[in-house]
């Protein structure tokens, strides 16, 4: 599928020339040039209008704090200063994915025929892969037979039935019909700490799978800052192999890390995804490259986020109208 309308050369030239290092510089630019914050400007200028139909950014005082926390991590995410093209592009991903809501969320679950946590376990044709057999994950069968997993989670509901199971259905992609799939930990607590549930999508780009979470384990173990929550987990996970941490960590641990570390982990998840996906944040200032489909293009950035050509085309069009509105 060919890309949508190209971003104008004038918008690219203008926006590539505005460099940003901190959130204060983002605020200063939009207050100076547009007389309001980026969120308010976007909602008033482009929100709910084609191609941003159906999208309005969250505009609350609390979310503004989140905006600042995230965009003050420019150096962490990008490894240096950025320009307006990079800001708008990543902000457009967040606008596409979470409507600019800077409270990291975990993936929702439950669908017709796939209730509760079965939704994550099951392969649903045309909708989603099974997280139980996702590349890099340990199946529930492997988790329920792992010494570290069993020792850590043996007090949870269901351990008496499922620890050391020989039921090979837990290696599959169809939830066992005779097992409750409710999210209530009083009923399925032992099951919920398996990879299919624990390493579901979290954060602004829905970090998913043990392999991607392993990078966050390494970040925590190497952390040298002063965030109390990260320091706590660094001590707790000290000298443990990443796979052991993966078996022993809990859903609550990961919810805490994503939601209660001043967005440090949420920002690191974006950085790691960018690195593992070929560096899509290094967008070109050359109109031909930015409008193309290869490295440095908006199309490739959208494709790496979603895997969908349709999304990539829509994403490029959406970024283009934002950049043109800023330049105009």
Image: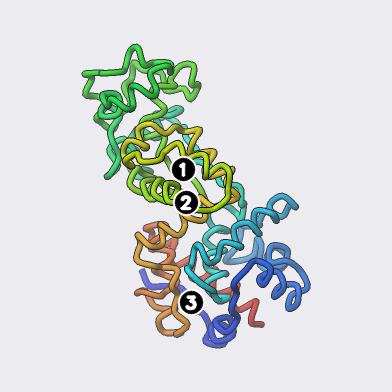
- Name the residue beneath numbered marker 2: 223
Q: Position of residue 56 (x, y in %)?
A: 66, 57
In the picture shown, does residue 36 fall above or below 219? Answer: below
- From mark 2 to mark 3, how far is it between C-alphas? 43 Å
**Quick one: quadrant of the N terminus?**
bottom left
Give the mark nearer the N terminus: 1 vs 2.
2
Note whether residue 113 is visible.
Answer: no
User: Helix or strand or loop: what does disc 3 sit on?
Assistant: loop
Vertical order, 35 against 171 (above or below): below
The reply to whether residue 90 is in sight is yes
The residue drawn where x is 41% and y is 68% is 280
Using the image, tell me which numbered label, if any, was put on residue 5: 3
Marks 1 and 2 sit apart, C-alpha to C-alpha, by 7 Å
Sequence-wise, which precedes: disc 1 or disc 3? 3
Camera-nearest label, 2 or 3 = 2
Residue 225 on image: x %, y %: 54, 53
Q: Secondary structure at mark 1?
A: helix
Query: Could you tell me if the residues under marks 1 and 3 are in contact, i.e. CB atoms within 8 Å?
Result: no
Given residues 294 and 239, the one toward you in this image is 239
Q: Which residue is label 1 attached to? A: 234
Residue 224 in the figure: left or right of residue 199: right
């Amino acid at each position: 599928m060919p890309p949508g309308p190209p971003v104008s050369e004038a918008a690219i030239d203008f926006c590539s020339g505005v460099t940003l290092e901190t959130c204060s510089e983002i605020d200063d630019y939009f207050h100076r040039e547009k007389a309001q914050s980026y969120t308010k400007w976007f909602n008033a200028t482009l929100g709910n209008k084609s191609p941003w139909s159906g999208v309005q950014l969250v505009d609350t005082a609390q979310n503004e704090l989140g905006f600042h926390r995230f965009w003050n991590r420019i150096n962490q995410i990008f490894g240096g200063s950025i320009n307006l093209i990079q800001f708008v592009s990543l902000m457009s991903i967040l606008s596409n994915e979470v409507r600019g809501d800077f409270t990291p969320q975990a993936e929702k679950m439950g669908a017709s025929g796939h209730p509760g946590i079965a939704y994550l376990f099951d392969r649903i044709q045309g909708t989603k892969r099974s997280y139980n057999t996702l590349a890099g994950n340990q199946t529930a069968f492997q988790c329920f037979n792992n010494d570290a997993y069993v020792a850590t989670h043996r007090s949870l509901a269901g351990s008496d039935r499922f620890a050391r199971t020989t039921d090979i259905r837990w290696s599959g992609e169809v939830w066992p019909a005779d097992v409750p799939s409710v999210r209530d930990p009083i009923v399925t607590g032992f099951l919920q700490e398996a990879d299919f549930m624990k390493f579901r999508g979290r954060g602004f780009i829905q970090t998913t799978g043990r392999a991607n979470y392993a990078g966050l384990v390494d970040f925590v173990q190497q952390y040298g800052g002063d965030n109390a929550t990260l320091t706590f987990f660094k001590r707790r996970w000290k000298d443990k192999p990443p796979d052991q941490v993966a078996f022993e960590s809990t859903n609550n641990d990961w919810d805490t890390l994503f939601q209660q570390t001043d967005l440090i982990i949420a920002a690191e998840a974006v950085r790691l995804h960018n690195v593992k996906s070929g560096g899509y944040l290094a967008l070109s200032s050359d109109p031909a490259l930015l409008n193309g489909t290869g490295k440095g293009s908006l199309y490739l950035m959208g494709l790496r986020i979603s895997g969908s050509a349709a999304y990539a085309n829509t994403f490029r069009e959406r970024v283009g109208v934002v950049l043109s509105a800023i330049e105009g």
